[in-house]
Image (cartoon, grey):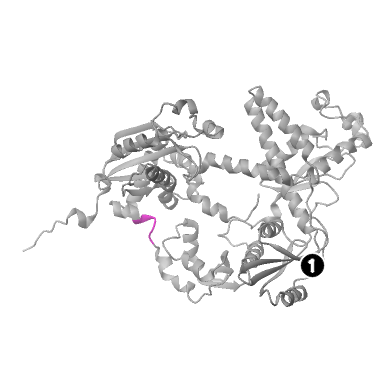
């Protein structure tokens, strides 16, 4: 006789079709709940694929709303003056959401939204309910390939899944778009056998079979700084990385914490692991850069094509002009140059910034006595923005004044250019020509970033020898030897024997003999890694040969202001990129 068995709901898990989800989205005054406040809450309640309720309220943040947030969201201070405070709005939202035993919260980049709600609850003295939370951005990174969508931002996924509502940085609209993205994700997860809430929660945290089978590669590694290289069956490098602790970092690749599809694909191909210990983390970072450039591992993305960086320079001809070039081989330190830039578009904006202030020519043909006979001046001559050297209306001596002004702006004194463009920008804004003002701002920003990078690089590569010390613990120091912008050695020592360590470094350190070009001994990425290291407050200069200096009125003094503006501007996309912020902070480019 056969006996039938009916499992209890607790034994099979809660079915997704029977689960009530509340998809929530927030608008705020900034990117951190520590110093920003909520301005709008939007939520959609769904069950069984159907919308059963919606919630939306503006919130009076009781603090000023930054202008760039108003531009992004359309929420003004006038709109929230009579809106409920966060205490009232939070109570209404919790009442809408229901019991945490019945409701599951969903958000795109959930740490951001839930972090703000938790902080608001703490501020109001309310115990935050123990809701289960699903992050659509996290799961999407596993079910949507990069070939299908370039990133997992809400706008990108909404378009990919054909959402009926387009995200527009308003809470309810974004919540509705997230609902469609969530349903699109669930359709894909069906083929993985995901039918219950527990399946969904654990999906992005599961360990692959390849991770489980290859954990042995992380055994026996030292807990020291170093470089590690994952290799395939043919001993070809697949991925090169660097870390302060080899043992912990390599082990993390074989845990549930590693969710990047690209890295999981790499692990499935790995057959062995090589590593090199280094005395300092700085040396590990530099070795990584050099190995990536040399080996070109297929799963590394950055630093593979350092020679293809875009620079801006003055051409060498009778009537020089500004051009963007790939690579620095043709750059001469006696000529005007700056960079590198993040692509040709950024370089073009910087060049256009120079055009705003100087009358350096914008045409491309080479000017000769013969070409002057058949050429005709362009509209820029009539607009008094060019002296028309192409037709002989401006002599070489007169034109050299524009070249000198440009060279000085690129390498020495950018004050005149910055002040002139700032004045024009505010003038346009005063006339409510905001699009033109914004374009000028973008040009000026590109110019400042590119010239500041160039000036910083030039300052270090001109130093024949520099030895620095950095305290690592009580009585312990790490010493670094740099020659012409190239790391030539590093070592650890104590206060007692530092003289012996320094002398040893000088004797065994790599010798730099070639000192030609703007990067005589290394790449721009290596120089910028060294500059970031040297910018630490605890750094001490032990010995220096030559002069290490920056132009007093160069773009560097304006860059610090620009970086603060950029930090605020990044809040325009804080919700999209919140969960990627740690990856971004690990990038070594100082662009």
Apparent side of residue 168 relative to residue 447 in the rendered image (left or right): left
**Residue displayed at 71% across by 56% down:** 524
Q: Is residue 145 a member of the stretch shown in magenta?
A: no
Task: Give the SS element for disc 1.
Answer: loop
Apparent side of residue 552 relative to residue 428 in the rendered image (left or right): right
Residue 584, image x, y percentages: 56, 52
**In the rendered view of the protein, which quadrant contains the N terminus?**
bottom left
- Marks counted in the figure total 1
Q: Main secondary structure of the magenta part?
A: loop
Residue 576, image x, y percentages: 49, 43
Q: Nearer the viewer, residue 569 or 345?
A: 569
Q: Is residue 495 above or below residue 323?
A: below
Q: Nearer the viewer, residue 188 or 422?
A: 422
Q: Residue furthest left?
A: 1
Apparent side of residue 322 relative to residue 115 in the rendered image (left or right): right
Residue 525, image x, y percentages: 68, 57
Residue 45 location, quadrant: top left
Q: Which residue is mark 1?
A: 512
Residue 403 location, quadrant: top right
Give the residues in magenta. 202-206
Residue 492, image x, y percentages: 65, 73
Residue 494 is at least partly visible in this image:
yes
Q: Is residue 18 above or below residue 513?
A: above
Q: Is residue 289 above or below residue 156?
A: below
**Residue displayed at 41% across by 70% down:** 213
């Amino acid at each position: 006789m056969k006996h039938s068995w009916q499992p209890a709901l607790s034994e099979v898990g809660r079915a997704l079709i029977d689960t009530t989800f509340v998809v929530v989205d927030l608008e705020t005054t900034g990117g951190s709940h520590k110093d920003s406040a909520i301005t709008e809450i939007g939520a959609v309640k769904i069950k069984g694929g159907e919308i059963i309720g919606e919630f939306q309220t503006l919130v009076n943040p009781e603090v000023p709303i930054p202008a760039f947030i108003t531009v992004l969201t359309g929420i003004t201070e006038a709109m929230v003056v009579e809106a409920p405070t966060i205490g009232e709005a939070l109570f209404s939202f919790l009442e809408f959401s229901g019991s945490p035993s019945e409701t599951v919260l969903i958000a795109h980049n959930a740490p951001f939204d839930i972090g703000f709600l938790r902080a608001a609850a703490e501020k109001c003295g309310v115990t935050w309910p123990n809701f289960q939370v699903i992050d659509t951005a996290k799961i999407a990174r596993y079910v949507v390939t990069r070939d299908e969508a370039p990133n997992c931002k809400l706008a990108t996924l909404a378009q990919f899944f054909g959402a009926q509502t387009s995200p527009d940085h308003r809470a309810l609209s974004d919540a509705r778009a997230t609902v469609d993205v969530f349903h699109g994700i669930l359709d894909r997860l069906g083929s993985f056998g995901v039918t219950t809430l527990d399946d969904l929660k654990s999906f992005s945290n599961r360990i692959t079979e390849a991770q489980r089978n290859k954990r042995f590669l992380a055994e026996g590694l030292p807990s020291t700084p170093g470089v590690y290289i994952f290799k395939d069956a043919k001993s070809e490098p697949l991925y090169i990385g660097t870390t302060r602790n080899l043992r912990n970092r390599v082990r993390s690749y074989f845990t549930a914490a590693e969710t990047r599809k690209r890295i999981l694909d790499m692990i499935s191909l790995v057959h062995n692991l090589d590593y090199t210990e280094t005395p300092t983390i700085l040396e590990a970072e530099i070795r990584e850069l050099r190995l990536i450039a040399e080996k070109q591992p297929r799963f590394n993305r950055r630093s593979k094509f350092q020679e293809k960086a875009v620079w801006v320079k003055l051409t060498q001809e009778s009537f020089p002009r500004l051009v963007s070039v790939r690579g620095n081989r043709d750059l001469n330190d006696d000529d005007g140059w700056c960079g590198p830039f993040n692509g040709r578009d950024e370089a073009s904006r910087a060049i256009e910034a120079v055009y705003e202030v100087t009358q350096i020519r914008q045409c491309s043909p080479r000017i000769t006595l013969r070409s002057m006979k058949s050429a005709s001046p362009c509209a820029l001559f009539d607009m008094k923005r060019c002296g028309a050297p192409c037709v002989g209306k401006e002599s070489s001596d007169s034109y050299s004044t524009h070249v000198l002004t440009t060279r000085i702006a690129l390498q020495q004194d950018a004050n005149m250019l910055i002040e002139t463009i700032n004045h024009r920008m505010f003038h346009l804004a005063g006339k409510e020509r905001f699009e033109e003002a914004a374009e000028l701002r973008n040009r000026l920003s590109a110019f400042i970033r590119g010239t500041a990078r160039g000036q910083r690089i030039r300052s270090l590569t001109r130093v024949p020898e520099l030895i620095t010390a950095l305290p690592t613990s009580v009585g312990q120091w790490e010493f670094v030897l740099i020659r012409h912008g190239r790391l030539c050695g590093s070592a650890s020592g104590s206060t007692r024997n530092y003289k012996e360590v320094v002398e040893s470094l000088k004797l065994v350190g790599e010798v730099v003999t070639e000192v030609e070009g703007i990067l005589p001994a290394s790449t721009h990425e290596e120089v910028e890694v060294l500059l970031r290291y040297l910018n630490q407050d605890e750094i001490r200069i032990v010995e220096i040969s030559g002069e290490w200096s920056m132009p007093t009125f160069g773009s560097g003094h304006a860059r610090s202001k620009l970086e603060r503006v950029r930090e605020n501007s990044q809040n325009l996309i804080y919700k999209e990129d919140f969960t990627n912020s740690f990856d971004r902070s690990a990038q070594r480019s100082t662009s």
